[in-house]
Every structure is written in C-alpha cells, then in structure tokens.
Image: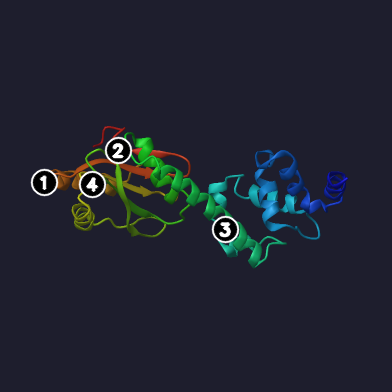
Amino acid sequence: MPSYEKKQAIKLWAEDDRPREKLLLKGKQALSDAELIAILIATGNTEESAVDLAQRILNTVDGNLIELSKLTVKDLTKFKGIGLAKAITIIAALEIGRRRREAEVLQKKQIITSKDAYEIFQSTLSDSNYEQFWVLLLNRAQKLIRKVNISEGGMTGTVADPKKIFKIALDQSACSIILGHNHPSGNLNPSEQDIKLTQKMKKSGELLEISVLDHIIVGDNNYFSFADEGLM
C-alpha cells in the first residue's frame, strides 16, 4: 500500500517537477542537461515550463556547459523567470562540477603527456573569460607538487614574470615546470609573445637546472602544446 500511494503522488506532481520524477525512477544519467538545470531552478515563467526555460538558456550557448559556466548573475537574470536566487544556484552548481573535475584530475598526480597537463589546466581555465597564466611544479618523478596561479589579465593578455615563476619553483624544490595559459577567444594559435616567452623561460630554466617541459595553451575544448608541435 505505501509504495502504491507514493507512485500515485509522483504522477500528481506539477509539470515543472517532472524531471525530479524522472531522476527518481530512471536515475540521474537519464536526464538531459536542460532537465538537470530545470531541477535547479524549480519553476519557469508564465510562458515556459522550467525545462523549456532551461533549454532556452542552453540554446544561447549552443548547449555548451563550459560556455554556460562563463555567464554571470547579470547574464542569467536577463532571462524571464530567472531571478537572483536561481542565477546563483545555477552558478554554484556549475562551480561544484568544475571543482569535482579538478579533484579527479589531481588524483592522477603524475604528468606524462601534454594531455595530462591540459586536463589539469583545463579544469581551471576552460571557463574563464579573461586570460590567466599558471604553472605546474613537478618533482623528479614528474609528479605534481603544486599548481600555481602566476597572473591574471584581461580578455587579450596577461603577464608572466620569469623571475617570479622560477623563484616559486626554487622555493618548492621543483625539478621541472609546465607553463599554461588560456586564450578566451578560443583561438589556440600561439602569439609571437607566447613564443618569445616560452623560449626565454626554457633558456632560463636550463641555467637553473629546472626543465621547462611544455607550454599549454587552453581553448574551450582543446589545447595547443609547444612540446607536441616541436617548439620546445
């Protein structure tokens, strides 16, 4: 009898709550991105259900969750039915997802390929609207000691000071480092400044006996590796 009553109650849930029913009955994997977001926002507006509203928001970023995570509270509240609380809920959920992805990547620790390095940088840089420069510090076994944010810039550039980078590397007893920064435009081609900096860092590292193994440029869903392209 209790199970029958529960089943009847689920059938009577409002339309906006149906993604919750689907999750309960079929599991979280059965839900689309729009349905998951609909659960977060709970209700739609006078013209749209929560699912329809969520789908419309996703359509503005071509269904790309990384692009969605770049939207600000101000961006989200432009949609009818998304107030401050709902916008914050969406942003918080996406940030939890990003941190989980980063935690999973860091468990691997050892950096063997450019893809290993990209996965660590990507968890931080892929959804950033401004350019950031980071460095991975590695020990003799090429295991990650620490990931360090060197600088943050604007939409088109940031500053990476070799003196600061190598001081941090020496303080952490790093044997090698991997440079990484993002291009918010999505264009993965290295600039002339990127190439000159990489060459300068490599030469400086040789003098200090700290190997510069690679320089990774992160785009939306891909990367450019100086090492893979024979530019190291």
Q: Label 1 to label 3, Cα distance in Å?
A: 45 Å
Q: CA distance from mark 2 to mark 1?
A: 20 Å
Q: Say if mark 2 contacts mark 1, CB within 8 Å.
A: no
Label 1 CA crowd tier, 10 Å (few <14, some 14–19, many 20+) = few
* Disc 2 versus disc 1: nearer the observer: 1
**Label 3–label 2 contact, CB within 8 A:** no
Give the structural element (helix, strand or loop) at label 1.
helix
Does residue 196 lie above or below 82 as drawn?
Answer: above
- Locate the C terminus and report the quarter of the image it occupies: top left
The quarter in which the N terminus is drawn is top right
Residue picked out by circle 4: 196
Q: CA distance from mark 3 to mark 4?
A: 37 Å
Mark on residue 91?
A: 3
Viewer-nearest of labels 4 and 1? 1
- Mark in the foreground, 2 or 4: 2
Where is residue 106 drawn, in percent x and y?
A: 39, 45
Q: Nearer the viewer, residue 154 or 149?
A: 149
What residue type is disc 4 on? Lys
